[in-house]
Amino acid sequence: MGASIWEIAIEVARGKLKTVDNVGQSLLASGFDILPIALDHIEGLHELPDHHRDPFDRMLIAQAFHEGLTVLTSDPAFKKYDITIA
C-alpha cells in the first residue's frame, strides 16, 4: 500500500490524477493498513524476473511475494509471477 500511495502522490503532482486531500489518511480512516516498504522488499526486487517494467508494480509484486499477500489487479503481467492474484 505504501508503494501505491507513493505512486498516487506522484500522479497527483503531475496533474494526471485528482484525488481527495490526504489520500493516505483517508485510506487509514477507511480501514486500510499501510504496508511500509521494507529492506526485504527492496532486496527482493533483484530476484524478480523482468516480466514487468513498472517500478511501482514491481515493488507491489516483491511485497506480495515476501509478505504472502494477494494483489488485486487486472494487469496480465502480474500473472507471470509466483504471487496470488485476485
Image (cartoon, helix red, strand yellow):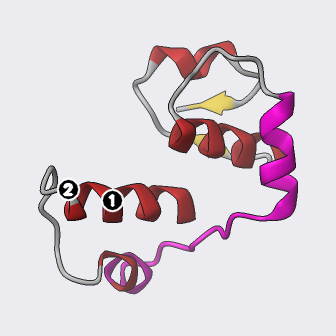
Give neighbour class at mark 2: few <14, some 14-19, many 20+ (Cα, 10 Å): few
Q: Residue 33 carries which label?
A: none
Q: In which quarter of the image is residue 3?
A: bottom right
Give the residue displayed 52% in from the left and 32% down from the top: 86
Instruction: Return the x and y of residue 10 as percentages of the image width and height.
Output: 33, 59
Q: The disc labelled 2 sits on which kind of residue?
A: Arg
Q: Is residue 1 visible?
A: no
Instruction: Return the x and y of residue 41 as percentages of the image width and height.
Output: 79, 52
SS under mark 2: loop
- Quickly name the residue at label 2: 14
Q: Is residue 85 visible?
A: yes
Give the residue displayed 52% in from the left and 44% down from the top: 56
Q: Which of 65 and 46 is in front in this view?
A: 46
Instruction: Return the x and y of residue 64 as percentages of the image width and height.
Output: 71, 44
Above or below for 45 versus 38: above
Q: Give the range drawn in magenta.
A: 26-47
Above or below for 41 versus 5: above
- Quickly name the residue at label 1: 10
Q: In which quarter of the image is residue 37?
A: bottom right
